[in-house]
Amino acid sequence: MDQHRSPRRARRILAALALAVPLVLSVASCADDPGVAAAPAAAVAADASEPMPWAEQPDGAPSIHAVTPRESLEFPPGVDYGQALARLFTAARGGGLPEGTRTLPPLPVEVVYAEAPDPTRGLRLSLTAPWGWVPGTGAIRAPSVALPGSLTTAEAQEMARRMADPTTPLPPEARVDVPDLPACQVRDAEGERPPCP
């Protein structure tokens, strides 16, 4: 883990979703803070036979430019990006889509989400790369979940074990991380965005 990250980031618990893949837990260390990676089974897409590129990455993160674009989800009006990610993550654990959403055609390849064009519409989130992608390489980011830094290693491992069961609700102490996206990955309400480098 990058030693230049803040201690708060070092306490992040990575929980990557995977479709029909057995649970894999591993403990990693960054300074004195524990990290546990979990991969619970999930089925999100309308076509569950093809896993989401952010959910299953057995050979590493695929490039945003090398995957088939997936549909987008429109959320109810008033739902922001962070809330949309939390709802998607929770619904994916149960094998479905977030309540109140509707499936729409894919957004442009590099767009992670599109702001609502007016108050009667909601934010549209890409199912290709809802947590964004890495500029330069195009690598699609997997989701991550933060747990309180006050947990002991044993407590973090126990919480990760419980989180591995997709039928178990996400613990109230856990928070789905919201990445800070470059402007080029967000389409504004007018349908504009700067080009990606």
Image (cartoon, rainbow, N blue to C red):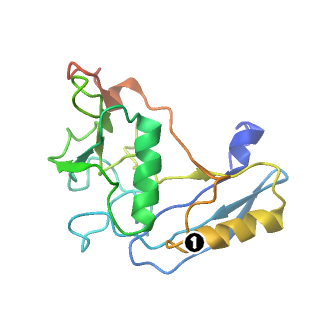
Name the image quarter holding the C terminus.
top left
Secondary-structure class at tag 1: loop
Q: Which residue is at a point 66% across and 67% down the rendered structure image? A: 160
Judged from this view, the residue extending furthest toward the bottom is 22
Q: Could you say where residue 76 lies in the image, as x and y percent from the top left?
A: 30, 39
- Residue 123: x, y in percent? 30, 35
Question: In which image quadrant can residue 186 be found?
Answer: top left
**Which three-letter amino acid code belongs to the residue tagged 1?**
Ala
Q: Is 27 or 134 nearer to us in this picture? A: 27
Residue 55 makes an appearance in the image: no
Residue at image position (72%, 46%) is 10
Task: Give the farthest residue toward the left.
Answer: 105
Q: Classify 10 Å Cα crowding around label 1: few (below 14), some (14-19), many (20 and above).
A: many
Corner quadrant of residue 187: top left
Identify the residue position indicated by label 1 in the image.
Answer: 164
Q: Measuring 63% from the left and 59% from the top, which residue is drawn there?
A: 171
Spot occupied by residue 29 in the image (x, y as percentages of width and height): 76, 58
When the figure is inspected, residue 155 is found, relative to residue 86, above or below; the finding is: below
Q: Can the viewer see residue 60 in this picture?
A: yes
